């Protein structure tokens, strides 16, 4: 059972190494796409921020002049600017979420993290085996571990050195 688990971990590591090696040829293209997406997102954010400011100004002026003939039109313009800004921002977020470069970058980062975790587990196992502190054979079923237990026969099961 333990050997199967170790073989499965090594197999997973090999697959991760192959996937990362294959993915590494696309990293420059992914980085360029992410850089382009960041520039686009910054432009969209600037535009939606400016539209939100215009909406706020139109709303404040509309409220101040609500009883004049121009007031209701300014309030409608405020709602229009606000709705447009929200729609553009939502669309931009949806594009970012479903963008292929973002998905690939997230997968590569996840694979790298998983590979590092497997390497650290393998390193711990290697160190413990070298120090002979990891038991590779299963415990015999008929032998109970009794070290540190006192008064087993009377049912108290106190640990040695405890004051209970």
Image (cartoon, rainbow, N blue to C red):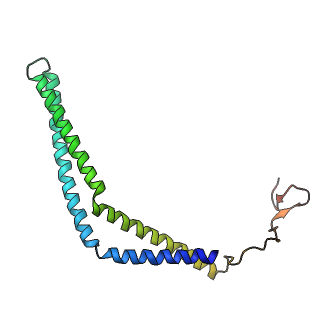
Q: In the visual, does 57 lie left or right of 115?
A: left
Tally the numbered discs.
0
Name the image quarter holding residue 18: bottom left
Q: Quadrant of residue 31?
A: bottom left
Image coordinates of residue 100 in percent, x first then y, are: 28, 62
Q: Nearer the viewer, residue 107 or 47?
A: 107
As drawn, the residue found furthest toward the top would be: 67
Image: 48 above or below 137: above
* In the displayed structure image, the side of residue 91 where residue 130 appears, left or right: right
Q: In this view, does 44 lie above or below 57?
A: below
**Depicted 1 relative to depicted 96: above or below:** below
Residue that sits furthest to the right in the current view = 154
Residue found farthest to the left: 69
Where is residue 35 shown, x and y percent of the image? 22, 63
Which residue is located at x 84 percent, y 58 percent? 157
Q: Residue at x 30, y 61 (%)?
A: 102
Q: Residue 27, image x and y in percent?
A: 29, 72
Residue at 63% across, 75% down:
2
Quadrant of the frame with the N terminus:
bottom right
Q: Where is residue 128 in the image (x, y as percent from the top left)?
A: 62, 77
Image point 41% across, 69% down: which residue? 111
């Amino acid at each position: 059972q333990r050997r199967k688990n170790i073989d499965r971990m090594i197999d997973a590591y090999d697959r991760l190494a192959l996937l990362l090696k294959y993915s590494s040829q696309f990293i420059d293209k992914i980085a360029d796409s992410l850089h382009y997406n960041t520039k686009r997102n910054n432009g969209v954010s600037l535009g939606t921020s400016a539209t939100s400011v215009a909406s706020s100004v139109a709303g404040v002026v509309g409220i101040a002049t609500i009883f004049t003939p121009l007031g209701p039109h300014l309030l409608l313009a405020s709602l229009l600017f606000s709705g447009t800004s929200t729609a553009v921002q939502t669309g931009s977020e949806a594009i970012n979420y479903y963008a292929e470069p973002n998905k690939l970058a997230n997968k590569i980062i996840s694979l790298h993290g998983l590979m590092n975790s497997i390497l650290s587990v393998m390193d711990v196992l290697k160190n413990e085996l070298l120090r002979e502190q990891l038991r590779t054979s299963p415990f015999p079923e008929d032998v109970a571990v009794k070290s540190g237990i006192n008064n087993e026969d009377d049912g108290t099961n106190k640990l040695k050195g405890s004051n209970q």
